[in-house]
Image (tube, rainbow, N blue to C red):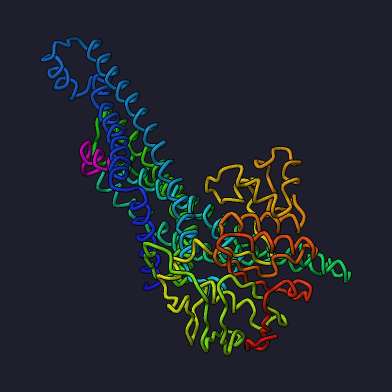
Amino acid sequence: MRSATLRWRALGGFARAFRASAGPRRSWTAIAAVAGGALLEGFGLVLLLPILAVVFDDAGAGRIGASLDAFGIRGAGAQLWFLLLVFAGVVALRAIVLYRRDILLAELQGAFALAQRRRVIAALAGARWTGLAGLEHARVTDLLGSEIMRVASATFMLVQIVAAGAMLAVQAVLAFVVAPALAAVVFGLSLLIALPLHRAAMRSHAAGQGLHRASFALSHSVTGLLGGLKAAMAQGLQHRFAAGFERVQQSLYDEQLAFVRLQARSRMAISLAIALTGAGAIGLSVSLFAATPAVLVTMIVIFSRLAGPLLTIERALPTLAFNLPAFEAIGETVARITPRALADPRAVPPRWGDIALSTVAFRHRDDHGLHRADLRIHDGETLGISGPSGGGKTTLVDLIAGLIEPDAGRIALDGNALDAEAIAAMRPVIAYAPQEPFLLHDTVRWNLGWGEPIAEPLLWEALDRMGVAALVRRMPHGLDSSVGERGTLLSGGERQRIVLARCLLRAPRLLILDEATSSLDLASEAAILRAFRSLTPRPTILLVSHRSESLALCDRIVRVEQGVVADA
């Protein structure tokens, strides 16, 4: 019982999130469109009763004729045509309302999926780096890809359920107006349909959780597919590697097939229940309630129209429950990421000067990191940072950049402690170039400014100083040429040069080069450092490198080994 309660609670949270995404105005507009479509359908069905009464000339025809006589519509033929025209008008108006309803609901569905993707990206952008470092890339890829698509599907199913529920409510009221006793018996029998629907939804939710786990495992496998395959081929083990990948894929297939079987069984049971209930309704109308022909035909039409919404709910509710774990996974991931405390940037950037680290320490979960760092970096100095892999070099520069906070000790800029507000204020004057240059699948222009409009002469100047302007001029569309996925249309050195040009355009006060020139020759590296040093004011440069020739270009060198910083 507790498990079921939690699942319905999750469904309630999903519905509230969807409503909040739509906003009050659009929510009420959508509700009005759904209700209007249902009411017009009900009104159209109500019109069947006087039309059939006139056709069959039953007991109600006299009352209807008298009412229409008052409006000057006399004679059975004229009254029938008048009622048919009104019926056609109602059908046409309903078609217009349903068209508008479907467009509006589709817009809300797409907007909600977009909002969930933005929610994940905003959480990633606002998190602490320490919270992101342990987050699996495959999980993020899965959430922003297949899981968002499942959320979109769940939203569509929720919309279908709401629309079908409104239709059922109107038709139920109509049935009670036309034949109260018969409607009470039939709807009492129909309550039996709710039990298999509830059970199917619960089983579908469990199947959806299994699919989420299988999809996540597949994303993990795909992320490392090519890299793992290369190593497997070199050792002649590619077939074993492929077999391992196949197991993960088979698991995903089994979960999807299990849901399809579950849904097919549920649909079969609901269809049988609807057929038996409809047959019982017709038999009771004739044998027990002695319904007139007009009432009988109207009730048959009403109950036949009930089958459509019921089958819609039968299909949509298990699918909604099946896809609900995707929405839950987004919430769990967002909650897992520790949010960065929002700090208002200072009105003016902090006064720049020396950077001083006093007994600074930071330990990662694997106990690596920095054990103790006492270091003063002079304003405008080019500091080389050397040491073995895993010794703490990247941890040192991440601490200075404010990406992580020290467990102990103090970091100061020009004598002032680097708190959250100071770090937020200094962000615009920091440029960071990692070892693996990151370029979006976009144009050279966009990758240089990340969407910020920058005058074209400044772009060409930066590219020229980084030694890559000639290459960009040769590209098909110059600055507006695509660099390919992750910059694959460029070589490693060319990607590094474009990233460095982006750093140069920031005119930074602090430049961090974490193996960012590893693909360049020594002469090119020296020229690039000269370009940065010629900036006014001259930036403080932290150059992390394993190459002794690169470190020789620095003003001073420190070595980071086993978490300890010392002069080289």
Where in the figure is residue 482, as x and y percent of width and height?
Answer: 68, 44
Q: Is residue 193 left or right of residue 566?
A: left
Q: Is residue 417 magenta?
A: no
Q: Residue at x 33, y 53 (%)?
A: 20
Q: Is residue 101 above or below residue 81?
A: below
Is residue 203 visible to us here?
no
The magenta span reads 170-182
Magenta stretch holds residue 179: yes
Specify the principal SS of the magenta part. Answer: helix
Q: Quadrant of residue 223?
A: bottom right
Residue 420, position as x, y percentages in the image: 42, 72
Quadrant in the rendering for residue 455? top right
Q: Nearer the viewer, residue 355 or 225?
A: 355
- Looking at the image, residue 232 sits to the left or right of residue 178; the answer is right
Tell which residue pokes out farthest to the left in this image: 70
Residue at point 49% right, 85% down?
A: 407
